[in-house]
Image (tube, rainbow, N blue to C red):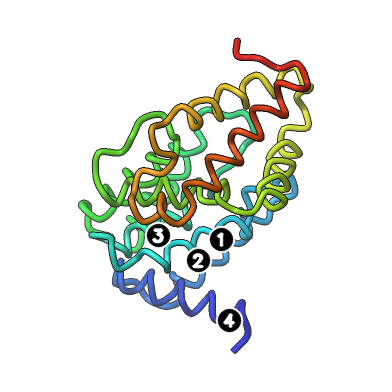
Amino acid sequence: MGANEQELARFVALWRRSLASDPGRAEAAYAGLVELYGEPHRYYHTLAHIRHCLRQFDLAADLMDQPDAVELAIWFHDAIYIPGAMDNERRSADLFREWSMAAGAAADFQESVNDLVMATTHRTRPSWRDGQFMVDIDLSSFGLPWEDCEQDGQRIRAECAHLSDDQYYPGHLRFVRTLQNRLAFFFTEFFQQRYGQVAHDNINRIVANLAALGYRDR
């Protein structure tokens, strides 16, 4: 079985396990997500990001309360992505609700996935353990070696090519500053121990590089 076939089989099993849906509906959901993550304006928010998140999920799934909800939230959290839009997460969560409702999902499970997707707005610290794992997984690429972290930053910048540097970098700096100012970069002990120091060093380097280019907090 090839890598794509394994991924499809994993998704179908997750969908059916969580939603008690037929295989055809699960395969259609997978195909729909693959199409969305393959949109031509995407450079970072692609299947590569989802696959990275799933690898991190696999490392910590045994520590989660509802791992199936977290795994589905990973699949859907960037399903809708329009650069610069403020409601991407809301629309992504709504897409899951629409598709899962058609598959007969229980309301409480829908709500769990909805809350996990919305946690990736990164506006507040999640108050529950799975939410903290979700946020840490989404930001775990900051804990990659510098060259990989820097490439991810370039991919995100490419998605905002319609913005000038003076429009883009001040807002980007504000976001990374919020990460830099955390007492600990990651919310869970698992990810803090695994990637915390590297992520902290990478964030400091990003801020220093932007300062060298003349960008400051506004």
Q: Nearer the viewer, mark 4 or mark 1?
A: 1
Q: Quadrant of the C terminus?
A: top right
Q: CA distance from mark 1 to mark 3?
A: 14 Å
Q: Label 4: how many residues lie within 10 Å, few (<14), some (14-19) or many (20+)?
A: few
Q: CA distance from mark 2 to mark 4?
A: 17 Å
> Helix, strand, or loop for circle 3?
helix
Q: Name the residue that disc number 4 marks.
A: 5
Q: Which mark is residue 55?
A: 2
Tell me what residue is drawn at x 38 percent, y 71 percent: 14
Q: Name the residue that disc number 3 marks.
A: 72
Q: Nearer the viewer, mark 1 or mark 3?
A: 1
Q: CA distance from mark 1 to mark 2?
A: 5 Å
Disc 2 or 3, which lies upstream in sequence?
2
Q: Name the residue that disc number 1 marks.
A: 52
Disc 4 or 1, which lies upstream in sequence?
4
In which image quadrant can residue 190 be found? bottom left
* Outermost residue, top side: 218
Q: Position of residue 151 (x, y in %)?
A: 73, 48
Q: Label 1: how many residues lie within 10 Å, few (<14), some (14-19) or many (20+)?
A: some
Residue 49 higher or lower than 9, as above or below:
above
**Which of 215/164 is in front?**
215
Q: CA distance from mark 2 to mark 3?
A: 14 Å
Residue 164 higher or lower than 38, as above or below:
above
Q: Position of residue 120 (x, y in %)?
A: 44, 41
Q: Label 2: how many residues lie within 10 Å, few (<14), some (14-19) or many (20+)?
A: few
**Does the residue at mark 1 contact the one at mark 2 (Cβ under 8 Å)?**
yes
> Helix, strand, or loop for circle 2?
helix
